[in-house]
Image (cartoon, rainbow, N blue to C red):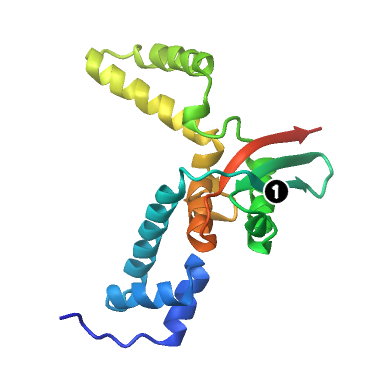
């Protein structure tokens, strides 16, 4: 039998503000986790990722284009954010997400969308550099391979939009942010093209 922990409205409100999940989802998560705030937040994050995975195959033919121009008028970015329906595309939360991603692009200057989108030529060039750096020490070949793979992943994670820590909340990546909104808005959302300008 489940522990009947009393969940207050204040706890639900705090969890909702942190995660963006619905009131009902927050109450259920807190009940499920016996009132433990951190466990409930992790529970909701996991649920959000599961929902995003289920929706990932759904077609995204609607969306919005958002632009961000920095106050110095020397840096700007444009991003295409895609979703399933025009209804969600016009939603203020979706529009705000697109703007936040454009702002992030302007600030962090990502080169690629994700590790999977890195051209083979760029990957090979960096792999050559990483291999040369690693081969300087006397290490067994299987250790060298692991180190090279680790360096490649770290390098491209730092310059790929989806794996960069979000500028407004360093605890989550852009990918986590999009998954949160998928869970909240109930549609598949994905980042399309993006471009950054700097003078």
Query: Does residue 43 appear left or right of residue 59 in this picture?
Result: left
Query: Which residue corresponds to the image point at 53% horizontal and 20% vertical from the top-left?
Result: 119
Query: Which residue corresponds to the image point at 48% horizontal and 68% vertical from the top-left?
Result: 21
Query: Which residue corresponds to the image point at 39% horizontal and 64% vertical from the top-left?
Result: 44
The image quarter in which residue 152 lies: top left
Depth order, front residue of 140/27:
27
Q: Provide the residue designation for mark 1.
A: 64
Which quadrant: the N terminus? bottom left
The answer to whether residue 156 is visible is yes
Judged from the image, the secondary structure of the residue bearing numbered disc 1 is strand
Depth order, front residue of 83/198:
83
Outermost residue, left side: 1
Q: How many labels does the image show?
A: 1
In the rendered image of this protein, does residue 120 appear above or below residue 43? above
The answer to whether residue 139 is visible is no
Measured as percent of width and height from the top left, residue 52 is found at 44, 51
Measured as percent of width and height from the top left, residue 138 is found at 26, 12
Measured as percent of width and height from the top left, residue 4 is found at 24, 86
In the rendered image of this protein, does residue 42 appear above or below residue 131? below
The image quarter in which residue 136 lies: top left
Query: Does residue 147 appear left or right of residue 165 in this picture?
Result: left
Measured as percent of width and height from the top left, residue 118 is found at 52, 24
Q: Residues within 10 Å of mark 1 (few under 14, many from 20)?
A: some
In the rendered image of this protein, does residue 24 appear above or below residue 83? below
């Amino acid at each position: 039998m489940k522990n009947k922990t009393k969940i207050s409205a204040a706890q639900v409100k705090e969890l909702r503000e942190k995660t963006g999940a619905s009131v009902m989802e927050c109450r259920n998560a807190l009940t499920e986790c016996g009132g433990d705030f951190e466990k409930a937040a992790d529970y909701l994050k996991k649920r959000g990722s599961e929902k995003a995975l289920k929706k990932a195959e759904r077609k995204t033919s609607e969306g919005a284009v958002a632009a961000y121009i920095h106050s110095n008028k020397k840096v700007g970015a444009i991003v295409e954010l895609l979703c399933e329906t025009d209804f969600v595309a016009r939603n203020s939360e979706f529009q705000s997400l697109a703007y936040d991603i454009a702002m992030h692009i302007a600030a962090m200057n990502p080169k690629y969308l994700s590790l999977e989108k890195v051209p083979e030529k760029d990957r090979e060039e960096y792999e050559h550099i990483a291999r040369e750096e690693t081969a300087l020490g006397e290490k067994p070949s299987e250790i060298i391979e692991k180190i090279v793979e680790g360096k490649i992943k770290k390098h491209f994670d730092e310059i790929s939009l989806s794996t960069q820590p979000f500028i407004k909340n360093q605890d989550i990546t852009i990918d986590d942010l999009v998954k949160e909104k998928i869970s909240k808005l109930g549609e598949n959302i994905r980042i399309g093209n993006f471009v950054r300008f700097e003078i």
